[in-house]
Structures are given as C-alpha cells and as structure tokens.
C-alpha cells in the first residue's frame, strides 16, 4: 500500500521505484485510466483496473493473479483517489484478509523526495481500528498536495 496519494506524480515515482526492484508486482488503478491504446501497456506493467461499480470483478481479477503467482505485491492507494477524503477505503483490508496476505506500508514524502518502505501490517479484523492505524502511519509523510491528506 502506498500513500499519501495526492497527485499523478505519485504513480510516476512509485513506478520508478517498483521497476528498479526485482519483485513481481501488480497495481490497482481506476478503470478509466486503462483507455484504448494504453490498456495493453498498463496491464503489462502490472495494472489491474477497478470499476467501483463492479467490485466483484476486481476480486476475481486478484484471485486470478493470486492463482497464477505465488509471491507478488499488489500496490494500492488507501484513499482510492487523488482528492481529499474523509475516510480511507477499506477494500484493501478485505483483499488482504481473503488472500491471507500482509500489507506492506510505503510512504511517499514529497517534502524530502523520498519513498519509505515500511513495516508489514496485519489486519486485525477491526476495520475502523485498522484504518486509523494506517491513517496515522501515512500522516508522517507529506504528499505533493499535503492539504489533501
């Protein structure tokens, strides 16, 4: 999980880091980014489109990736958008629980131009408590638009 997600530059920086690592990764992005002409490239880069109107399709896509790869990372922005949100999305907690996975925290800090790979987080089952812990972690980082987080 990477955050805070406050601008399109987050994707560029995160992809630069991820591509420099020797890891099998996938990332989740809104379906409208996967436009004709870019769809195949984005999928080849590990992209998994999510249409919020059809969350079951995302669950199936992640299950397909889980079945195909035994060790991989899925990068998700907990805000689910680049805009200011009052509450983080909780779908990533369900994904972690259903795939018996841990969540690795990664903070993007534009104030000092760094990305910090943090500790692993295991969901407790208490969604509100988990979201508060995650929000607290990301509050240590300053996004490109800090007023959005």
Image: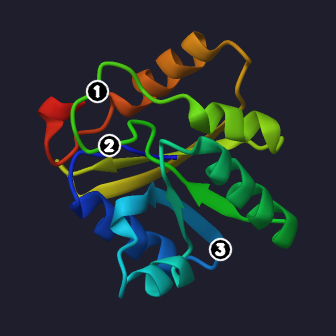
Which callout, 3 or 1, points to the residue nearer the camera? 1
| Side of 94 where 101 appears, left or right | right
The answer to whether the residue labelled 3 contacts the one labelled 1, judged by CB atoms less than 8 Å apart, is no
Compare marks 3 and 2 and give the one earlier in the sequence.
3
- Name the residue rendered at 65%, 52% in the picture: 57
Question: Which corner quadrant holds the C terminus?
Answer: top left
The answer to whether the residue labelled 2 contacts the one labelled 1, judged by CB atoms less than 8 Å apart, is yes
Q: Which residue is mark 2?
A: 81
Q: What colour-coding does the image apply?
A: rainbow
* Residue 86 percent across, percent down from the top left: 30, 19
Q: Please, what secondary structure does the residue beneath circle 3 have?
A: loop
How crowded pointer 3 is (Cα within 10 Å; few <14, some 14-19, many 20+) is rated as few
Q: Please, what secondary structure does the residue beneath circle 1 have?
A: loop
- Name the residue rendered at 63%, 79% in the picture: 22
Q: Please, what secondary structure does the residue beneath circle 2 have?
A: loop
Q: Which residue is mark 1?
A: 85
Compare marks 3 and 1 and give the one earlier in the sequence.
3
Residue 147, located in which quarter of the rendered image?
Answer: top left
Which callout, 3 or 2, points to the residue nearer the camera? 2
Mark 3–mark 2 distance (CA, rounded to whole Å): 25 Å
The front one of 113 and 62 is 62
| Side of 40 where 70 appears, left or right | right
The front one of 80 and 149 is 80
How crowded pointer 2 is (Cα within 10 Å; few <14, some 14-19, many 20+) is rated as some
Mark 3–mark 1 distance (CA, rounded to whole Å): 30 Å
Q: Which residue is mark 3?
A: 23
């Amino acid at each position: 999980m990477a955050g805070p997600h406050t601008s399109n530059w987050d994707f560029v920086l995160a992809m630069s880091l991820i591509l420099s690592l020797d890891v099998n990764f996938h990332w989740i992005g809104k379906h409208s980014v996967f436009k004709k002409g870019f769809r195949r490239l984005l999928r080849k880069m590990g992209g998994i489109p999510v249409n919020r109107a059809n969350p079951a399709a995302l669950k199936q896509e992640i299950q397909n990736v889980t079945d195909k790869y035994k060790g991989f990372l899925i990068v998700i922005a907990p805000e689910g958008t680049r805009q200011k949100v009052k509450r983080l999305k909780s779908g990533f907690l369900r994904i972690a629980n259903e795939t018996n996975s841990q969540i690795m925290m990664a903070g993007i800090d534009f104030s000092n131009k760094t990305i910090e790979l943090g500790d692993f987080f295991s969901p407790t089952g208490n969604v509100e408590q988990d979201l508060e812990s995650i929000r607290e972690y990301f509050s240590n980082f300053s996004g490109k638009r800090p007023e959005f987080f």
